[in-house]
């Protein structure tokens, strides 16, 4: 008998993760989770992707991108845990890491509540870090009732071709939780790809243009929606789940209210 105690947990997709010890060398393949770990347990984060831009002073080895992680580099970092996300990372990369003997925890985030629950499980159950103050603040902020008018809103995330946020996404739920009505509202693709005529046919009352993943800006995006109020917003506020959730709700409300008020004054 070895006397070892192994704890078996199941990630957001139900895949088992066997842990003998609390993970102390973690590689993150998800920008949102990288920020959450860097803020909460900075001494345990040993690797992140090139797309992990927060915190701004993050100084860890890079393992290439979310869709093409460098498996050799990850292996050399000797992680006892890699964190990934169903939407942002490829199943083949997760399988290859597991086949190499590297434990992987996969998250699934398609709503605000799911994000908060997933973050809580990772930080409390998996890495035993407790519930950080920013997560408590985020939970409190997003428990508030909707504050914005239920105007029809379109949220493009790419152009040429145009792609917009669907309702069955974290960003779509963020918009709905603010009080807005995201369109298109159906059970189609999570990120519908629309041609120009389909985009025009949505006839929104408001357009939100985030600065990521496509870098919409004052001179790149608003001109495509003549006569419609357009709010340029932080992509991090709209698409990232993690420490930014503590302030994103208030920041989005201020930005959107300012846009709506400027159109009625």
Image (spheres, grey):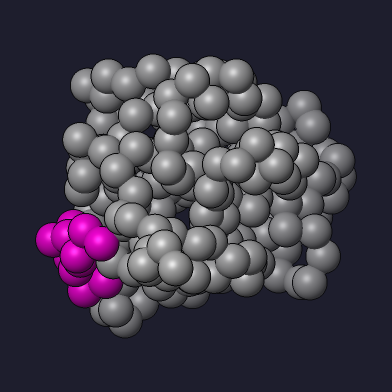
Q: What residue sits 44% from the left and 68% below the top?
A: 1
Magenta stretch, residue numbers? 128-141
Q: Is residue 135 above or below residue 75?
A: below
Residue 67 belongs to magenta span: no
Q: Position of residue 133 (x, y in %)?
A: 13, 61
Frontmost residue, 108 versus 214? 108
Q: Position of residue 12 (x, y in %)?
A: 56, 67
Residue 137 belongs to magenta span: yes
Q: Position of residue 95 (x, y in %)?
A: 72, 45
- Can residue 218 be seen here? The reply is no
In the image: residue 11, left or right of residue 4: right
Q: Position of residue 125 (x, y in %)?
A: 34, 68
Q: What residue sits 67% from the left and 25% below the top?
A: 68
Frontmost residue, 148 versus 166? 166
Where residue 72 sits, quadrant-wise, is: top right
Q: What residue sits 79% from the left and 72% below the top?
A: 187
Magenta part, dominant SS: helix
Where residue 196 sits, quadrant-wise, is: top right
Q: What residue sits 20% from the left and 48% below the top?
A: 40
Q: Is residue 178 above or below residue 30?
A: below
Q: Residue placed farthest to the front in the image? A: 1
In the image: residue 203, left or right of residue 6: right
Q: How many marks?
A: 0
In the image: residue 163, left or right of residue 38: right
Frontmost residue, 190 versus 203? 190
- Can residue 185 be seen here? The reply is yes
């Amino acid at each position: 008998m070895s006397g070892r105690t192994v704890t078996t947990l199941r990630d957001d997709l139900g895949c088992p993760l066997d842990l003998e010890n609390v993970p102390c060398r973690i590689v993150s393949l998800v920008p949102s989770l990288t920020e959450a770990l860097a803020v909460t347990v900075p001494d345990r984060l040993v690797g992140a992707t090139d797309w992990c831009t927060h915190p701004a002073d993050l100084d860890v080895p890079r393992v290439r991108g979310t869709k093409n992680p460098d498996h050799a580099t990850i292996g050399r970092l000797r992680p006892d845990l890699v964190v990934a996300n169903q939407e942002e990372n490829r199943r083949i990369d997760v399988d290859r890491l597991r086949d190499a003997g590297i434990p992987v925890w996969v998250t699934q985030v398609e709503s605000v509540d799911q994000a908060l629950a997933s973050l809580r499980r990772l930080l409390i159950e998996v890495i035993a870090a407790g519930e950080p103050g920013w997560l408590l603040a985020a939970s409190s902020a997003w428990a508030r009732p909707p504050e914005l008018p239920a105007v029809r809103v379109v949220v493009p995330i790419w152009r040429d071709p145009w792609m917009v946020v669907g309702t069955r996404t974290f960003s779509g739920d963020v918009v709905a939780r603010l009080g807005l009505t995201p369109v298109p509202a159906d059970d189609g693709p999570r990120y519908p790809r629309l041609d120009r005529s389909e985009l025009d046919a949505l006839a929104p009352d408001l357009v939100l243009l985030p600065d990521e993943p496509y870098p919409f800006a004052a001179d790149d995006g608003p001109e495509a929606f003549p006569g419609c109020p357009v709010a340029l917003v932080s992509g991090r506020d709209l698409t990232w789940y993690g420490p930014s959730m503590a302030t994103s709700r208030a920041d989005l409300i201020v930005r959107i209210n300012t846009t709506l008020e400027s159109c009625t004054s």
